[in-house]
Image (spheres, grey):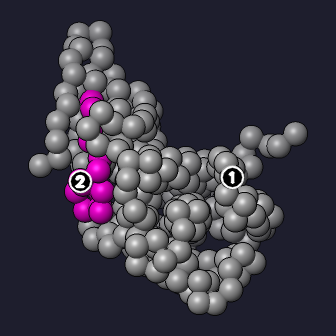
Amino acid sequence: MRDSTTFTVPVKENEKLKKLVQVIQADAELNQLWRSANVNAMERCGISDHGEVHIRIVANAALKILRLLVEGGVVPSVVKDHGLTNEDAELIVVLAACLHDTGISVHRDNHERYSLFIGYHKARQILAQIYEEPALTIMVADVLHAIIAHDADERCLTIEAGAVKVADATDMTHGRSRIPFEAGEVNIHSVSAQAVESVGIVAGPTKPVRLQIKLANSAGIFQVDELLRHKLSESSLVPYVELAISIEGETERRIITGELS
C-alpha cells in the first residue's frame, strides 16, 4: 500500500508522466530537499509548510489547470514554440512544481534563484531518463523558466509557467498561506490565513479555468488580492482564468464574481 506522503499525480494515459512520477518517487536527493526546505520554512523561519505536502498540492493543481486549459483550446507553449506535445507540457508543469521551492533548503529569502541552480542539476538528471537531445534541453529550459517565474513579480513567458505560478498560490487554505506571517500574532496576515475554507479548480462557464474560493469571512479577501490575484495578474493566464469568491460566515454570506482588472 502506497504511503500517504508519496508523491503522486493522475498520469492518465501519459506514459512519460508515469515514468516521471516513478523517478521522482525514487529520488532520495529530491525528497530530502523537500524535507530540508520545510525545516528552513517551518522550524527556522516560522512560516507555513513548503515541503512535501505543498509540492504535492501544487503539482496536482498545476496539472489540473494545464489540462483544463488544453481542453479549452489553449495550446501549451512547448507545443506552439518547439513542436513538442501536450503530454510533454504536463511533464514541465509537474517537474517545475516539484523543483520550484527546493531553493528554500538553502534560504527562504530569494529562494526562487536558489531553486534555479538546484533545479538545473535535478531537471537534467531526471529528464535524461525520459528524453534525448534536443528535446532534453528544451524541456529543462522550460522547467527552469517555470521555476523562476513562480516569483510573484516575475513575468511568465509560457503557459506552463503560468499554470505553476497560479497553482502555487492556490495552496492557501486554513493557515497554508504562501504569505509569511509570524505565528501567534493577530494581524491581517494571520487572520486572513485562517479565512480561506477551500479553493476549487474547475472548468469555467466563459473561460477554460475557474478558481472557486470559499471564505469563512471577508478577511480572506486579503489572501486572494495579495497572493492569488497578484500572481494571476503576473502570469500568462489572465485571458483564460476567472475567479469566483464566496464569503460564508455566521454573519455574512455573499458572492463576488468578476473579471481580472
Residue at 53%, 63% (x, y): give it. 86
Q: Position of residue 22 (x, y in %)?
A: 77, 61
Residue segment shown in magenta: 231-245
Quadrant of the rendered image containing residue 30: bottom right
Q: Look at discs 2 and 1 and give the one toward the viewer.
A: 1
**Residue 92 visible:** no
Give percent across and percent down for residue 156.
Answer: 32, 69
Does residue 1 sit above or below 136 in this rendering? above
Disc 2 target residue? 239
Find residue 159 and report its image quarter: bottom left
- Viewer-proximal residue, 207 or 193? 207
Give the class, few, some or many, for how many residues have Cα within 10 Å of label 1's Cα (few <14, many ≥20): few
Percent position (x, y) of residue 79?
A: 46, 71
Magenta residue check for 244: yes
Asked whether the beta carbons under mark 2 and mark 1 sit within 8 Å of each other, the answer is no
Query: Against 71, is 236 above or below?
Result: below
Which residue is drawn at the image coordinates 39% and 37% (left, top)? 203
User: Is any part of residue 164 visible from this angle?
Assistant: yes
User: Quick one: label 2 or label 1, which is nearer the N terminus?
Assistant: 1
Amino acid under disc 2: Pro
For image coordinates 28% across by 24% down, the residue present is: 246
- Residue corresponding to mark 1: 13
Residue 206's label in the rendered image is: none
Which residue type carries mark 1?
Answer: Glu
